[in-house]
Amino acid sequence: MANEYETYVVKDAPPGSPSPKVPFQPSQPKPPPRQRAPKEEESFLQMLASFASVFVVGLFFITFIMQAFEIPSSSMVKTLLIGDHVFVDRVTLAPAAKWFPLMHYRQVRRGDIVVFLKPGEPDLFLVKRFIGVPGDHIHLKDGVVYLNGQAQDEPYKMSAEDAAPEEQFDTYRDQFPALLNDPGQRQTAEWQVALPTNVQDGDLVVPPGNYFAMGDNRPVSLDSRYWGFVPQANVVGRPLFVYWSFDTPEDQVNKHSMGERIEFLVHIVVHIFDQTRWSRTLHLVR
């Protein structure tokens, strides 16, 4: 009669002990790999919602936090050059918001460089240095600023000696406010009326809620000497740093036609590398 056998494997056992016989267990087949669920394609509405959220965040940022400006004139040379593109902090000098106490706010200080809306022209942004705050007494003698009776050391300014020969002396500009009316007729009509009411003992007195602004390039700057005080409500912010600077002609600011603008845009594209002032990239404004 034929014998029936079972196939066994031997487990490890102490020496001398009988080896138990264990039935052979065939290996189990590996389960098939798990398949990832196919990704759902983004619908048009979802894509539109994503774009809208990015747009809203960007709009909030450039409206309330940081804004880009270009310097179009030489009134702030040497501090800022024509063709400098700067980022302006719109938060620090803004009125404090009690609902968001984590933000840093402060008042404008003497010497701050500030972007503001020109008095009487609410669509025109200017950048100047605020040299007088409310209550200050200011006058100029031979182009030197006297603040509350003390002559100011201003290493950043361009003086009359640096100007062209025809601009080296101007009585109204350099002896301000000795003459209440500018012979060159550069004053605004409003300032002609307001200037005499703010002069005491030969000094211009800055009224509450206002500032006195001057460009660092004193011989060519049209500033508070010609159009008056800057109200606190006109303050936009302070420039932080230059993010790009391109060598721009001084008369470019006067070219407004579409053809002239396209021509200069083409010029930028062609000369983006050789006329960019690379050394001014990330230059701090102070």
Image (spheres, grey):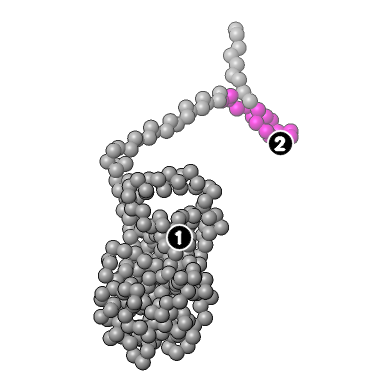
Residue 7 seen: yes
Q: Looking at the image, which is closer to me, 81 or 116? A: 81
Q: Is residue 27 left or right of residue 83?
A: right
Name the residue that disc number 1 marks.
Answer: 82
Residue 106 seen: no
Q: What residue is shown at x 37% (from left), y 72% (from top)?
A: 223
Q: Position of residue 119 (x, y in %)?
A: 29, 71
Name the residue that disc number 2 marks.
Answer: 14
- Secondary structure at numbered mark 2: loop
* Residue at the right extreme of this rendering: 15
Q: Which residues are magenta?
A: 10-25
Q: What residue is shown at x 32% (from left), y 73% (from top)?
A: 185
Q: Position of residue 160 (x, y in %)?
A: 49, 74
The label number, if any, that marks residue 97 in the structure image: none
Task: State how far apart marks 2 and 1 are (Cα).
Answer: 94 Å
Q: What residue is shown at x 33% (from left), y 72% (from top)?
A: 186
Under mark 2, the amino acid is Pro
Q: Is residue 92 above or below residue 16?
A: below
Specify the quadrant that holds the N terminus.
top right
* Mark 2 or mark 1, whichever is nearer to me: 1
